[in-house]
Amino acid sequence: MSKILIRTGAAVTALLLSGALSAQTLTLMDFNVRSFEVSNESGQTLIEDISDYIEFFRNQDPDIITLNEFENYTSRMGRDRMSEIASALDMYAYYIKSYPKDIGYYGNCILSKYPIVNASTKLISYQHYKGEGNYQWNSDEYTDEWGADQRSVGYVDILIPTSETENVIVRVACAHLDHLIFWDGKIRQCQEVVEFASLGNPPYPALLLGDMNESSGTPMAPIIEVGDWIWEQNLNLDHCFGFPKGKWTVESAENVNAGVLSDHHAIKVVVTLNK
């Protein structure tokens, strides 16, 4: 399932005009939400009320949010969590499916204050020792080459105002790469991300965010060779990159402690699009 939330034409026009003076500078946030399992005395517990997550996003006030380990419509979630967050924050949203999970899906999502005019998703190459139709808990041998479970990458093209009369399209990609796959496999996953989102020669200024489960070293080479590494979370997991090289200026970058909401910090980056 891939879903785009849209507004009416009049609402889009009003939104673009309201943001026209500052939208060349974008505030980005990436966060692995761990399927909304909070830390408590029991270890990790799935929670029904995600208002603390919504308030966390609202307090940071990002223009674009990318989220990993995001379950939607599953029996555990009980409803469309992506639409719930998007509605509360008045944002557009797009879901990136990694694999079906009981009655719903597991994957990633992208939220944007600005209209989404195009979007696409790709499953990263994967093989399971039990064959097609299996997506989790791979054998050790297969995990080394293909990963422990199915991963995905997706992107949205966002219409962003640069003045009261002009706009620019920015491509925002989001990925969640495997945490157990060996180096050769991780390099292959990174290459697939670059090729799918056309990050080596992007049609528009582009950004990539997500949980790469890797430092910015050798396995990330396919990404680093064509883009600028903007920020890496201090656990060496979550990243932000800009494309092509030299297209983005970093105004600020930080890790935001999410407390009990996840085993990851969020990353928050402010970038300006260079002319």
Image: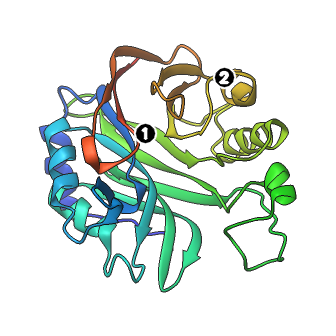
* Residue 75 screen position, x and y as percent: 40, 83
Q: Residues within 10 Å of mark 1 (few under 14, many from 20)?
A: many
The secondary element bearing badge 2 is classed as helix
- Give the colour scheme of this rendering: rainbow
**Which of the 4 image quadrants contains residue 8?**
bottom left
> Is residue 152 shown left or right of residue 36?
right
**Which of the 4 image quadrants contains residue 7?**
bottom left
> Is residue 234 shown left or right of residue 159?
right
Residue at point 66%, 22% (across, down): 224
Residues at discs 1 and 2 in contact (Cβ within 8 Å): no
Q: Amino acid at mark 2?
A: Ile
* Residue 11 screen position, x and y as percent: 16, 58
Name the residue that disc number 1 marks: 169
Residue at point 59%, 59% (across, down): 121
Residue at point 48%, 20% (across, down): 230
* Residue 231 screen position, x and y as percent: 46, 22
Name the residue that disc number 2 marks: 224
Residue 137 visible? The answer is yes
Residue 167 visible? The answer is no
Which is in the foreground here, disc 1 or disc 2? Answer: 2
